[in-house]
Amino acid sequence: MIKGKVQTVLGAVEPSELGLTLPHEHVIVDMTLGACSAHSLVNITESVRRAAAFPDAGLEPGEAGPGIAASWAKKWNQPICLENRADVERHWFYYGNYKINDLDDVIHEAKLFKRHGGGCLVDQTSIGLARDPKGLQQVSREAGLHIVMATSWYTHEYHNEEVKTFDIGRLRDRILRDLEVGVANGVRAGIIGEVGLNWPMHPDEEKVLRASIQAQKLTGAPLSVHTGFGPDAYWRVVKIIEEEGGDLSRTIMCHVEHRLPTRSAPDSFDPAPFIELARTGVYMELDCFGWEGSYRQRGKVDMPNDAVRLNYLTALADAGFESKLLISHDIALQHWQRKHGGHGWQHIPETVTQLMRYKGFDAKLIERILYTNPQEMLTIK
């Protein structure tokens, strides 16, 4: 890897060439695991488990069963349209919603992002989520955007036999190949992630994490980690990075705005654990901008909206961590695309930047969050 450069799917570039950067998106992704029915996918992944309507099937929390009422199973093959758009937003439980694999649609979304000032998308689609190196190149060329591809593996539900049988060293070498040689005729990854972890952490997930940390040490590439819910999940990652001699300053902690807080409403907003975690030197990534629906509440801890996300950013910046802040959308479902009535990749440059100004962010801080920080994070050290 070329030190001082950013590795994109079309080659290494100067960090200053990136422009406004979204550090955590899924440009092309398929989360269905090849499932052909609602019953075959439910209970396999965290996202689908949380979307499935167990009460609608006559089951209460904790009771065993298939968990899918007959009328819910019918939703599986319905395309997203105006008539069901609100239902899709509320429940996510539509088969096609778990796939973003139409290149024409993706190119359209990417062009909208560029039209609103966007310059770079970081595709955190790791191995097992249908990563598409050649597809990313095509989107990059046709939309005129920089795209950074990821490597490593998502949560254990998406692991192939290779992950289950390889030791840490062989997994590390596979990651190194993606970074230093490339795949699909030389398309190189520029970030290690999204390393998927549940909580408690599955043994194979810990193996992948340790392999990823070792690869980060050898290459200087950034490491991006998707944890389970709660502070313990984050602090376990910190401990493992320290055990492996990894670089916390080159580590991105994903989804902190809704996985780190633990205080029940009305006191869910609590910057203290954010500031404590930021003191380790990690990047604090608030990457679910655009998630505004109150019906996505999953418990007693309030799911933040964009305004609350910005309040966390303000608290972290005031505490001196403005150089470690990243924001993105984590668009991985079709209903978040503009074509299907969602906010799209243009949401941050078009809407969130205005909200930042309304809430008192100065131009210097906005530039640091949207330009400088992701450029520094993606630069190979």
Image (cartoon, rainbow, N blue to C red):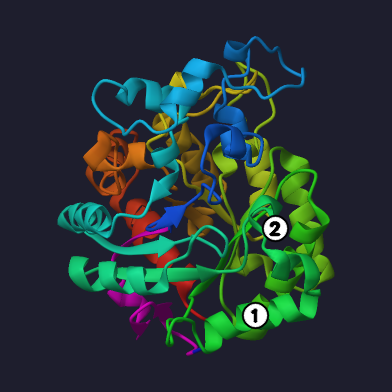
Q: Nearer the viewer, residue 270 or 86?
A: 86
Residue at x-position 29% and y-position 38%: 343
User: Residue 254 location in percent, x, y?
Assistant: 57, 51
User: In which quadrant of the rendered image does the C terminus lie?
Assistant: bottom right
Residue at x-position 24% and y-position 52%: 105
Q: Residues within 10 Å of mark 2 (few under 14, many from 20)?
A: few
Residue that mark 1 sits on: 174
* Residue lying farthest to the left in this orientation: 115
Alpha carbon separation for disc pair 1 and 2:
28 Å
Residue 93 drawn in magenta: no
Q: Is residue 354 visible?
A: no
Dot 1 amino acid type: Arg
Residue 344 occupies quadrant: top left
Residue 139 to residue 181: above or below: above
Residue 5 drawn in magenta: yes
Residue at x-position 57% and y-position 35%: 48
Q: Nearer the viewer, residue 129 or 145?
A: 129
Residue 106 to residue 6: above or below: above
Dot 2 amino acid type: Thr
Q: Which residues are magenta?
A: 2-23
Q: Position of 208 compared to 87: left or right? A: right
Residue at x-position 27% and y-position 71%: 138
Q: Nearer the viewer, residue 361 or 125?
A: 125
Mark 2 lies on a secondary structure that is: loop
User: Residue 107 location in percent, x, y?
Assistant: 23, 59
Residue 203 occupies quadrant: bottom right
